[in-house]
Image: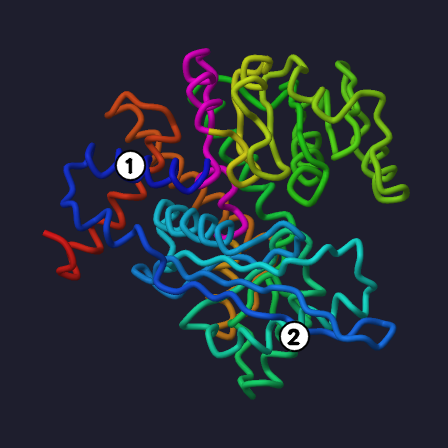
Amino acid sequence: MNTQELYAMINEASEHLELHDDFQQLLRIPERQLAFSVPYESDEGSMRVVEGFRTLHSSLLGPGKGGIRLHPETNIDETSLLASWMTMKNALMHLPFGGAKGGIAADPKQLSDKERERVIRSYIRKLSPYIGRDQDIPAPDVNIGQQEIGWMLDEYEKHLHDPYNAVFTGKDPVIGGIPGRVEATAAGVVHTIRCWLKEQDRSLNNLKVAIQGAGNVGSFCARILADKGAIITAISDSSSTVIDENGINVEKVLKTKTDTGSLGGDHESSAVFEVPCDVLIPAAMGGAIDEETARLIQADLIAEGANGPVTADADRVLEERGIDVLPDILANAGGVVVSYLEWRMNERKEEWSKADALSQLEHYMRQAFSRTNRTKQESGVSYRRAAYYTACRRLADVMQARGLIK
């Protein structure tokens, strides 16, 4: 889903809900877009410069919330689209956050560990005046993990002399992070799948699952689902797909990925989309399932572990074929839910256990699915449309309460 398609969905939701035209206008343009240079010193001592970005789409529901990614192809258009998605996601999940997203246009494979640290610290020095625990709260995203968030927090505190660690989420627990954040997105995907299965009078036991992507979300989805009795029949990375209709040894395959950098499968990476299964989880980058690929899929359900993995054309094909799609703003919201719990924990100066965090995550995911499913049943639309209708209703209610729209 690109920017045009996203706003077409918002417009459709607005018309369905009979909202004033001002609703669409208030969401159309981000509140703030930042694009800036990020200079850093190479290991050879020369100065290099990459681009950094941060978009705050909306602060209607609260401070901005969204990750920072490190990827050579990120740009201001991408971060603005992702920030808009975060607005929808946070509204659907009933979180007190607006939507934001950031990025650094650099290839982590071309950076040494020291260079990566210098890039990230430089980025935060430039961004520091625009973020804060009650203004805009960054988190991990593609190629950004606990270590990188630790560097960001350290640099932010040096620059602004602000000791509040609630300005970042996704931290290591020893510096205020919440246990369970690392696997939270995947755990949320699994919860939404279980909710869908309950509607179908089915269970995870012996459910056949194919997973595109072996990064954080894909690997944890595989582990969690296998542990709960599902059969992982296929898993892919950018170079290959491992397929076994009787069930993959998940830990063995993921260890190969860790040790060698590749799953070492015998099939090309796109083969994962043609594997017969009950559930397909696209958990890599956006746009992976286009119209042509959608015609090849042999699954009852697609649960979007990645952001925007299904194009609008593909979505129409899947709907015509009767394949349900649990959209990204619902299915992969586990990460931002647990980020909210971490922020709340920091603000209250509490300590939570992993069990506490994952229990609360399950509650939030079940409630969001219930709201979405209710809208789906009442309106007779797809899960994606139902999720956007529900999110837009939440945003409109807040706008009306504030007197921003009639």
316 in magenta: yes
Between residues 188 and 59, which one lies in front from this camera angle? 59
Q: How is the image coloured?
A: rainbow
* Residue found farthest to the right: 259
Mark 2 or mark 1, which is nearer the start of the sequence? 2
Q: Does the image show residue 360? A: no
Q: Is residue 333 left or right of residue 228?
A: left
Task: Work out whether 324 lies above or below 109.
Answer: above
Q: Which residue is mark 1?
A: 389
Residue drawn at the location 19% of the way across and 35% of the way down: 15
User: Is residue 37 part of the magenta span, yes or no?
Assistant: no
Residue sitting at x 62%, y 53%: 180
**Nearer-the-camera pick, 241 or 123:** 123
Is residue 332 in view? yes
User: What range of the chain is rendered magenta?
Assistant: 312-337
- The three-letter code of the residue at mark 1 reads Tyr
**Marks 1 and 2, Cα distance to the nearest angstrom?**
40 Å
Residue beneath disc 2 = 122
Side of 149 relative to 60 (left or right): right
Q: Position of residue 242 (x, y in %)?
A: 79, 24
Q: Is residue 174 above or below residue 255?
A: below
Which residue is most to the left? 406
Is 272 situated above or below 360?
Answer: above
Q: Amino acid at mark 2?
A: Ser
Residue 283 screen position, x and y as percent = 62, 36
Which residue in the rendered view is the most extreme toward the bottom? 161
- Expressed as whole percent of the image width and height from the top left, the position of residue 19 reads 16, 42
Is residue 371 left or right of 79 when viewed as pictured?
Answer: left
Which of discs 1 and 2 lies nearer the camera? The answer is 2
For the residues labelled 1 and 2, say whether their Cβ atoms are less than 8 Å apart: no
Q: Secondary structure at mark 1?
A: helix
Relative image position of residue 144 (x, y in whole percent): 66, 58
